[in-house]
Amino acid sequence: MVLWLPERWNDMPRIDREKLVADVDELATTLKKLAVLIHEQPELRFQEHKACAWLSAAARDEGAEVEQNYKGLATSFRAQAQGGSAARVAILAEYDALPEIGHACGHNLIATGALGAFLALHRQQANLPGAVELLGTPAEEGGGGKIMLLERGAFSEVDAALMFHPFDRDLLTHPTLANTYVTLEFLGRPSHAAIAPWDGASALTAAMDTFRLIDSQRIHLRDGVRVHGFMTNGGQAVNIIPETAACEFSVRAFTAAEMDRARAVVERCARAAALASDVELKVTVRRGYRDMRNNETLAKRFGVHLEGLGRTPKFRDPTVGAGSTDMGDVSHAVPSIHGWLAICDQDQTTCHQREFAGCAKSERGLEAMLVAAKSLALLAADVLEDGELRRSALAEFQQLS
């Protein structure tokens, strides 16, 4: 193992890099047990009361100051290790699960990896030239907990926001898509489906035609745009012309401008379908997430530490598809990284699949979590101690803003 160390030191107390790594190893049993516990008791967005309590208790047991119900979110928390005033680094934990398939996105590993990094740094609190905080960020799966925390000032004094995500390969940077949600509600006219179907106006027909029209427009969408939806209301009874029907679509793109163009296509298709079936349409747009601005300066340093721990990450891989995350919104506010670490073989499985959920509690997944904890701790130490690194990361961030 080769640890990267700054070339220049001053007379201030220094963070012991080798101790950071050793302390994560010392915490390994606790971190692994907690990762499995969160995995076995999955909680949906904004309902992560157990996971939030367990993570908070683990930080408190190490003597950290913990604030629960942080910024008014019941399942958020903040733990702090306060040193000097050089900088403030936030290490982000996610811990919500998916409906039916549980931790098929590996948030149990994200949470415990962040916890491990924080606890290792907290053990050297006296030597910290700045502050480190562990932020418990609920509801990444469609709830936007990080956005709520951002809007309430949680990141106002943060110099860098760091996290990792399980995947099928190691990547230092990877784009994510801006997204938004469009709910379409159709109101028609009921009638007996056998006696007088001609007297009815089918809301369901309009909803189904919307899907067909959107499919017909996919050839006109730019590469990387994703439009996918499902029926939330398909009628009330088989012998009634459906008076009401509804569907919801997620619209994603690499940029907000292209996302808005694709959303307009969806709305035009819905209006056309409603007109064809002579029904009314109500469109509701719900804010989603922004695209991810990977801070390459910080990502490259993260890669140095991964390599020192025996991993061989790629900087990026254009062959891999992209999803969306509320970390994207954070990355537009402060220099941020969202690195990816393999918990399975490449192309074996991927996020939101049942096999990936199994990998999230496998020994390989747990070991990857420990590597992430060490690398995040080492990177946070660099941000606190290396003013040139901070200035470079900030200059890159400002150039993209």
Image (tube, helix red, strand yellow):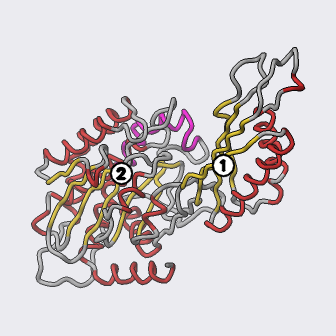
For this view, does 198 lie left or right of residue 28? right
Residue 351 inside the magenta-drawn segment: yes
Vertical placement of residue 69 versus 5, above or below = above
Q: Point out residue 40 in the picture as x, y percentages from the top left corner.
A: 37, 29
The local secondary structure at tag 1 comes to strand
Which label number is shown at residue 283?
1
Q: Is residue 29 visible?
A: no
Is residue 335 or residue 274 the one in the foreground?
A: 274
The local secondary structure at tag 2 comes to loop
Residue 5 inside the magenta-drawn segment: no
Q: Point out residue 253 in the picture as x, y percentages from the top left corner.
A: 65, 60
Vertical placement of residue 201 versus 288, above or below = above
Q: Main secondary structure of the magenta part?
A: helix
Q: CA distance from mark 2 to mark 1?
A: 30 Å
Is residue 168 or residue 1 the one in the foreground?
A: 168
Q: Earlier in the sequence, mark 2 or mark 1?
A: 2
Tell whether label 1 touches label 2 (CB within 8 Å). no
Which label number is shown at residue 137?
2
Is residue 125 or residue 278 the one in the foreground?
A: 278
